[in-house]
Amino acid sequence: MSYKNFPMVSNVIFGRGSFGQINDVLAPKRLSSKAPFIFLIDDVFKSNSWLTSRISLAYDDKIIYVSSAEEPKTSQVDKLVEDIILMTKEKPSGIIGIGGGTLLDLAKAVAIMLTNEGPAKDYQGWDLVKNPAIYHVGIPTISGTGAEVSRTTVLTGPERKLGINSDYTPFDQVILDSELTKGVPTDQWFYTGMDCYIHCVESLTGTYLNKFSETFGDMAIELCRDIYLSDKLSEEEAQESLMMASWHGGMSIVYSQVGVAHALSYGLSYLLGTKHGIGNCIVFDHLEEFYPDGVKEFKEMKARHGIELPKGICADLTEEQFNIMIDVALSLEPLWENALGKNWKKVMTREKVKSLYQKM
Amino acid sequence: MSYKNFPMVSNVIFGRGSFGQINDVLAPKRLSSKAPFIFLIDDVFKSNSWLTSRISLAYDDKIIYVSSAEEPKTSQVDKLVEDIILMTKEKPSGIIGIGGGTLLDLAKAVAIMLTNEGPAKDYQGWDLVKNPAIYHVGIPTISGTGAEVSRTTVLTGPERKLGINSDYTPFDQVILDSELTKGVPTDQWFYTGMDCYIHCVESLTGTYLNKFSETFGDMAIELCRDIYLSDKLSEEEAQESLMMASWHGGMSIVYSQVGVAHALSYGLSYLLGTKHGIGNCIVFDHLEEFYPDGVKEFKEMKARHGIELPKGICADLTEEQFNIMIDVALSLEPLWENALGKNWKKVMTREKVKSLYQKM
């Protein structure tokens, strides 16, 4: 029996307005005047001076705005790395990702790929990264994915949607400033928060669960209930609670795994480009069979916030397209084993996966 | 407003039996054949081959058994550092602390003092450490103190009982193997577990509390209730739960502070050498005025486990001795401010402190 040796985020700042400390945090990390800080920022903040004016650019520091309209891709990482190499005289002093899961995952991947040769797709998998990443900082502006604490950066590659899982992936620094999440639209707030809720349900009901994961998962679920099913929190408190729920939810899957919802959602995302948060919601809504209590509570949350999920997204798919999704989903063996046990293949046949997709 | 940038433990392994991975964890950290690993182990394990036989000593690696009968002292740290310098050809590759809070704090302090000049007492305070510590590993064999995650190592010096608080203090590696806690005597299990319970009550009711601390504190308190007030856990589950409670409790005071119980307990410890766990219990038992709900629940836990606390420990003290304790306790300003607010000095006069000590 061998247990994982989990690398944690090295430093964390928590507090409303703590984003204002960004320049003080970065200053001692500058390697030279030729080694800039590169800020990867969600392009929804492009003309948002409330956020960007607090970043002091010096020397060759650059902001690169990135759209999060699509899930992050290995080719996108390769392009960003190439651009950064061309525009900088020396390796950057640091990569700072500011945004949701997409931007955080891109920042982690770019920091890794600046010190590791070849294309990003070659590193999708477990422990394939050879060299330490460049110093990288994660600053979430939406809560729920857990990308701020995780040991992975999930990318869609030419062959699969799979994370770069490595000891070098976690951020060196995270800044948790709930004020940055204040402008998130309701539907996005719901989908991303439900990513946390859903992966906690998958973790807590999974066969891989241990006490470490359980305590973090329980806390995250309790916080989700406070946020999505009660009126007891002020708006600020709810933003802070969701930021902590995301953190604890991410910690919960360190030692366990996600499950059926994530596996099927990856298939949707690979074929149809469905974003992760909404994809999880679309899938989870049909998983009473596997997560009866969780799905019941999810539906209550959905109703309470008037969320309408897309329907019939698989209605017009060809057999070939179904097969692509089924291949992607079934390739995620640890997720199925966690959800259904060692004999999962007996339950989760190709026909069964297809029948689930057909409901969506 | 400036928020703390908290350094976290870099790596953590959780799992029953995970102590068996110690040699694999250390191997890549060996700097040279002349740079040994030094194991500081609680001397209760001296003839316990179940534990010690799993440590593979190589080259000049050494085990030093240390008594935890007394609270750790700055002079003890200085002596250990001197011994290690004399017995090793090069600076050690790592310091591994195996034991309770005393051993963990000693390991952290020794790792720091091997790379920082002068006596340990010069570093008692906040952010006085200049050089990074030697790689250090914490392996708790009793749960509750939170020393495995904290940014401090609390030492009794010639002038005060105060921690070496620094970014270099936290462990580089922690191994959480609940099996190591299986032989802890009931009274010690209670006192150390109550350290966790008490610092969570102090954190959760304090003026410094934020959502980060609150979520960790809530989780730890819930776990303490499961362990000390219910029958729902098996022995193994209770050991695992207490290990996680200790972790979360330690994380809870990252952003907040302890309070009245810890401040008074430090006075007892400084003058009378009272160990931290039992000292907190002795003090907390008389703090209904400050923590009514917490003290009520604590008394229930105490009764349920048939714990009898010493009484009259201050009965024969001289005025001078009371003054020493009062000085130590009142010097811990952040603790009082957290507990009672900015105007704490109006409430907590020397007479008031004395009257509290006289109850004990």
Image (cartoon, coloured by chain):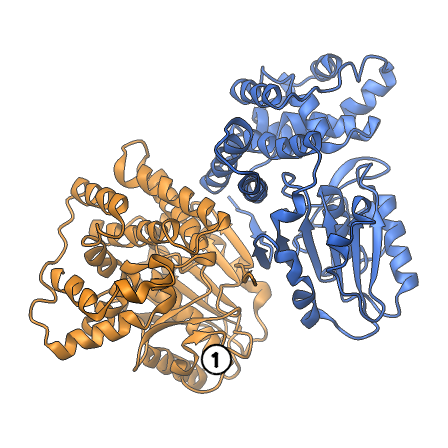
Chain colours: A orange, B blue
The amino acid sitting under disc 1 is Leu
Left/right placement of residue A175 relative to residue A49 reads: right
For the point 64% across and 58% down, the residue is B173
Left/right placement of residue B63 relative to residue A355 reads: right
Name the residue beneath numbered marker 1: A114
For the point 37% across and 41% down, the residue is A223
> Looking at the picture, how far across and down is residue A237, in whole percent?
36, 38
Left/right placement of residue A239 relative to residue A321 reads: right
Element marked by disc 1: loop
Task: Please state, as top left, top right, bottom left or bottom right, where the N terminus of chain A lies in the image.
Answer: bottom right
User: Which of the two residues, A307 or B336, is positioned nearer the viewer here?
Assistant: A307
In the picture as drawn, the residue positioned furthest to the left comes out as: A316
Res B243 → quadrant: top right
Count of numbered badges drawn on the protein:
1
Is residue B115 in view from this perspective? no
Left/right placement of residue B1 relative to residue B109 reads: left
Res A101 → quadrant: bottom left
User: Which of the two residues, A351 or A100, is positioned nearer the viewer here?
Assistant: A351
For the point 80% across and 69% down, the residue is B58
